[in-house]
Image: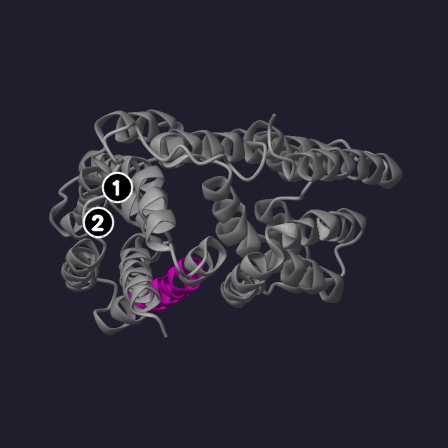
Amino acid sequence: MQPKAKTAYKAILAFGIVSLLGDIVYEGARGLTPDYMNFLGASAAVVGLVTGLGEFLGYGIRLLSGIFADRTHAYWTFTFLGYGLIIAIPLMAFANGWQMVAIFILAERLGKALRSPARDVILSVASDGVGTGKAFGIHEFLDQIGAVVGPIILFAVMLLTAGNYSITFAVLAIPFIVMLFFLTRAYRTIGKISIDGKKGDKSPPEGNLPAYLGAVAFNTLGLVPVAILLFRVSDFAQTLSQAWLVPLVYALVQLVDAPSALLSGHAYDKSRGKVLLLPFAISIFPTALVMLTNNFAVLLIAAAILGLIEGMRESIYRAAVADMTPLASRGKAYGIFHTVYAVSILFSSIIFGLFLDLGIAFPITLLYALLTQAAAIFLLRKSFKKPK
């Protein structure tokens, strides 16, 4: 292995472990914080408002943070600040009311918004000599391990402490401290992100970013969200009085997500991005399966395909942004990418929710999905062409 590639892998692995540990903290806590707020006296409406506002901050601020990261070149500052705000989760151990928990939730989501574009820029730079697909694939693979392990750890601690919230949240300080160690190690390995004093990399981008963002938007609009899948599973689970089936199906999505990210990242670098056509082409299948039936076996198949697509979205969808954007404007590009996805998933959730509530005929739903994915594939193919 070339020294340059060896250094790149060290940096990517360090960043992946950072995300793994960060996910143990905040993904583990996300399943417990609504219950904790309820315990502290918050109403359902308050819990919904706080979590909804948190998600808005987590995505809505990314465009601004990406722009400021590009203008200041302070990619590491935004990254350290963003990951540092995860300290809000262990600090919940000392909350004496739901209002304080709400502040901590919003602070952690703000941190997510601050770090995401800058972190993706650093990862794209670290991938030099390895490939952007591999870099984002490894990162997402480790990230998903944390997303699965985190809730298990919190469940175990709650069980061992007889439901002591303070001890459970305090335990999360341990992975948080280890996370900071690996983040510092990644910084020492990669070093400062250089913009060459000429406002960045002037090499021509390998693709058409506006067309690509349009493709991602249509792809997301026509893909049934995981939340709607779980809603259909919930109908089935209630019939059998087996509520545990819902988290089981969600776990399946997460478990498929991780290897999908890793394998697709490798394929992306080999195919020069053409593998992106795969998730777009198969996006029609989970939509059709989820909207057609609530048969549990069919829903499991839909969950597996959704996990496959989610893993690709978190790896190769992000990798393509780096290949289509000069370094000097990459933070802004990632901010726009995350914003486009957030808006699209919001409308997708509303549209498919209405299809279910209004009892829209399946052929109409299928036609909608086919048209949106056809538009997505058309724009995706157009995005492969360099702008003139």
Q: Which amino acid does label 2 sit on?
A: Ile
The residue lying toward the viewer, choosing from 8 and 291, is: 8
The colour scheme of the drawn protein is one colour
Decide whether the magenta segment is chiefly helix, strand or loop. helix
Residue 388 horizontal/vertical position (percent): 61, 25
Q: Is 185 part of what is drawn in magenta?
A: no
**Quarter of the view holding residue 180:** bottom left
| Above-or-below relation of 139 to 255 | above
Label 2 packing within 10 angstroms: few (<14), some (14-19), many (20+): many
At 55% from the left and 40% from the top, the residue drawn is 206
Residue 52 in sight in this render: no
Q: Which of marks 2 and 1 is nearer the N terminus?
A: 2
Residue 2 horizontal/vertical position (percent): 34, 70
Of all residues, the one furthest to the right in this rendering is 363
Image label count: 2
Q: What residue type is labelled 1?
A: Glu
Which residue carries the number 2 mark?
Answer: 89
Secondary structure at badge 2 equals loop
Which residue carries the number 1 mark?
Answer: 108
Residue range in magenta is 139-154
Which quadrant: the N terminus? Answer: bottom left
Q: Do the residues labelled 2 and 1 touch (CB within 8 Å)?
A: yes
**Quarter of the view holding residue 61:** top left
Left/right placement of residue 373 relative to residue 37 reads right
Q: Is 141 part of what is drawn in magenta?
A: yes
At 74% from the left and 49% from the top, the residue drawn is 281
At 61% from the left and 63% from the top, the residue drawn is 241
**Quarter of the view holding residue 101:** top left
